[in-house]
Amino acid sequence: MTVDRLLPTRDAEDLLDLTRTVADRELAPVAARHERAESYPEGLFGVLGEVGLLGLPYPEEDGGGGQPYEVYLQVLEELAARWAAVAVATSVHTLACFPVATYGSPAQRERWLPRMLEGRLIGGYSLSEPHAGSDAAAIICKARPVADGYRINGTKAWITHGGKADFYALFARTGEGSRGISCFLAPGAAEGLAFGRPEEKMGLNAVPTTSAFWDGAVLEQDRLIGAEGQGLAIALSALDSGRLGIAACATGLAQAALDAAVEYANERTAFGRRIVDHQGLGFLLADMAAAVDSARATYLDAARRRDLGRPYSRQASVAKLIATDAAMKVTTDAVQVFGGCGYTREFPVERYMREAKVMQIFEGTNQIQRMVIARQFAR
Amino acid sequence: MKIVVCVKYVPDATGDRGFNDDGTTDRESVDSLLSELDEYAIEQALKIVESGVEAEITYLTVGPDDAKDALRKALAMGGDNAIHVNDDDIAGTDALGTSLILAKAIERAGFDLVICGMASTDASMGVVPAMLAERLGVPQVTYLDEVTVEGTTVKGGGTVKGRREGDVATELIEAALPAVVSVTDRTGEARYPSFKGIMAAKKKNVEALDLDDLGIESDQVGLSAAWSIVDTATKRPPRAKGEVVEDEGEGGVQLAGFLAAKKFI
């Protein structure tokens, strides 16, 4: 069912129409097949880029769509309602453009940004390491200055689009402590860069997640984004935006699960009537709908604050927490609505349930979100 | 050169389409949109320009107020400007009358190449391109699966070449410009409009014309002047319930009997 949205402009309404058309034709029909086969949808991100969905929240003069977060996130939500893995990769790509778009020099922006925002170059984000996930300041991957740039040595982990992306926002150590991390725009292919085998994941299987092994690859000087040592500040300033992206993806996934459950509850009969007419099941659907609506409301509240230039860190964490917990609950309950059928791979809801789990984990676990929220209360 | 692409605003083929009491199309009860078959014509016009031919692309439609949506969609895919012929007296016009209006508007705009879809998705007569060519007095090259333009100069000239797939033969056809062509749904997927294209389309010029502007008298068109009208229409009957074979040990035989009766086996 089409979500009734409050959008700020006619352009935004047209954009959402376009998104639904493209997602219905290019994502929905092939998502289940690719997820089951764990096969990458070759060419799909090219289409999303041509249509203009891969640089939405960045300025038009840089090649972006000039859209507020309030609108961009609703586009992500619509993508996620058809195919969570593609929506997550879109969110990650958008995040990977953030360092260059926000901290890049005019020359760097001109050289790379248009191709990134038009989706001709697809990006990944490379902050995490095997022993540094939530604790980003603990990374040890090294970037040692050499004659014409930096030599990179170390291991990065959990890279969405790993081995497939054209570039990575890479964070590595140029010194000690929290001011010793720098941000680089790393190419997807370089001598001395190798990617691990894709992780065998519970869900989101069509887009690979890999480790990256840096063994002495040299990045040219102009691939340093911002100042040396500014990396952690860049990473932290991107965090809240990334969390909102995941909140929107989780909301879309929950919406898809609710839609599937409602559809089934109107068809399936038991004890002589449709199961939607049984109060016990109706209440289950009502709680699912309330969870979806509250998820959407919290991420839109945070997005509108961001668009107005107001602080939104707390609201971003609330949105990420509420929306991803909602996705877990709603997808689990959707399986319940489908009964035994829900537990089989013939129906989509078991996949939704598997896809929801990781959303409580990545872009800051939901425990980290609670820490961010609670931190505001300490006087 | 100048390319005119004719497009039609039609009731959504996936909707519940019907007729008014006078046999004209019921436009109230179902959403309308750009005829899907015309998207192929738009795509081919854009491809011709992308192949290096310098051309201005103008979209032309004849239809009610909302038909502007079809022009906006076309302009969002690409192209330069559009013409919308809209007049209350046009309601009920048949293919012959439509071709008259289109031809007058095309002559007024100027053209080297007119591209049409192979038919509309509502009436699906497929005769307008041929009628247009006759009225304009130029060659017609219809039902093309492939189309290219060669040898054009700023002064005009050049040829249009195409491939038409038939049941028994493939024809390679060419005509000197100016000409009218129609293209099939086998010419290649039509592109999506991009978000930037949608925003840019809002700034492109759509010229509004009525019958007066084209020098057409109201009694030349409309339902009263139509040579083809919808006399009666019957709703497609709902699908009848299939025959259920109860298997009481003889199911296979009954099944074979059923298939044999339908001449499947």
Image: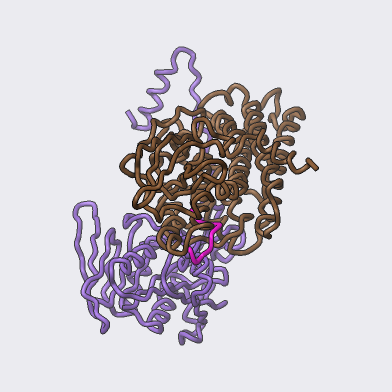
Chain colours: A brown, B purple
**Residue A323 pos. (x, y %):** 66, 40
Tell me where residue B81 sits by quadrant.
Answer: bottom left
| Relative side of A268 to A161, left or right | right
User: Which is more toward the observer, B27 or B178?
Assistant: B178
The residue positioned farthest toward the right in the image shown:
A379
Tell me the chief SS of the magenta region: loop
Q: Tell me which segment is drawn in magenta.
A: A53-62
**Residue A232 pos. (x, y %):** 56, 46
Tell me the residue at 45%/61% (across/down).
Answer: A109
User: Which is more toward the observer, B144 or A61?
Assistant: A61
Q: Is residue B107 magenta?
A: no
| Relative side of A157 to B114, left or right | right
Tell me the residue at 25%/76% (across/down).
Answer: B177
Q: Is residue B155 above or below residue A60?
A: below
**Residue A29 pos. (x, y %):** 46, 41
Tell me the residue at 66%/53% (across/down).
Answer: A303
User: Which is more toward the observer, B100 or A248?
Assistant: A248
- Quadrant holding the N terminus of chain B: bottom left
Tell me the residue at 38%/28% (across/down).
Answer: B259
- Quadrant holding the C terminus of chain B: top left
Tell me where residue B127 sits by quadrant.
Answer: bottom left
